[in-house]
Image (spheres, rainbow, N blue to C red):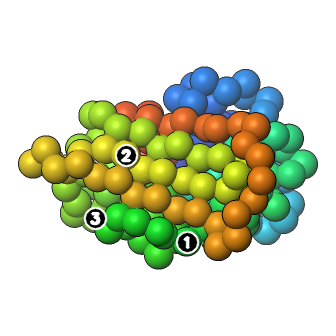
Amino acid sequence: MPKIQPGAAERGNVIAHELGLPRSIVTNTMRKMKEAGLIAAARPVAPTLYSRDVARILLALCAPLPVNAPFVQHKLGSLVRLSGDGAVNAETELTDLLDESAGLVAGDIDFRKGEILISSDAAFMVVSGERAGGTVVNRTYRAETDLPGMRRIVQITLPALHRIAQQLL
């Protein structure tokens, strides 16, 4: 039997709870992303949520204000891989991690420990964790040009990412 997709309100609740963010920030960010056409929107029934949509929402939540979410999501999603064996850019890396965590694709990342660090100001993303065999995983994504300053770093633990994927995908 197929999994029943949660509605839009439940999606926001799951993300807000797992990341420890106010629900209003998550809801407003998702609304701005829908208005920009970056995630699917429909009424009266919420459309199917795909891992790329969740990845875009997570990147957009790094914005200091929801109004900046589409710009920040685009900037962070296009970060290129500098080191490690991950995907070609940050958005695809998060999408792949969500797919693996939800069991949609095979993989060997241990989602019980590890973290993702993202900075929208300095424009970088680092994935740190372990494979099932204990091998360390370090994947670094950064802008092609160095951007000055770093005022904010967002941390998403791999266990929280796993719970989000399990509940939403």
Question: Which residue lies most toward the left here?
Answer: 133
Label 1 to label 3: alpha-carbon separation: 23 Å
Amino acid, disc 1? Val
| The one of 91 and 49 positioned closer to us in this rendering | 91
Residue 152 in the image: above or below residue 39: above
The answer to whether residue 7 of the structure is visible from this angle is no
> Residue under circle 1?
80
Where residue 127 appears, as percent x and y from the top left, is 42, 50
Where residue 105 appears, as percent x and y from the top left, is 28, 64
Residue at (73% x, 24% y) in the render: 22
Callout 2 secondary element: strand
> Residue under circle 2?
128
Q: Nearer the viewer, mark 2 or mark 3?
A: 2
Callout 3 secondary element: loop
Amino acid, disc 2? Ser
| The one of 126 and 73 positioned closer to us in this rendering | 126
Sequence-wise first label, 2 or 3: 3
Residue at (51% x, 37% y) in the render: 156
Name the side, left or right, on which 6 lies relative to 47: left
Amino acid, disc 3? Val
Residue at (64% x, 73% y) in the render: 144
Count neighbours of disc 1 (C-alpha within 10 A) and say few if under 14, some if 14 to 19, many if 20 or more. Answer: some
> Residue under circle 3?
105
Residue 131 in the image: above or below residue 147: above
The answer to whether residue 67 of the structure is visible from this angle is yes
Name the side, left or right, on which 122 lies relative to 91: right
Label 1 to label 2: alpha-carbon separation: 16 Å
Count neighbours of disc 3 (C-alpha within 10 A) and say few if under 14, some if 14 to 19, many if 20 or more. Answer: few
| The one of 46 and 125 positioned closer to us in this rendering | 125
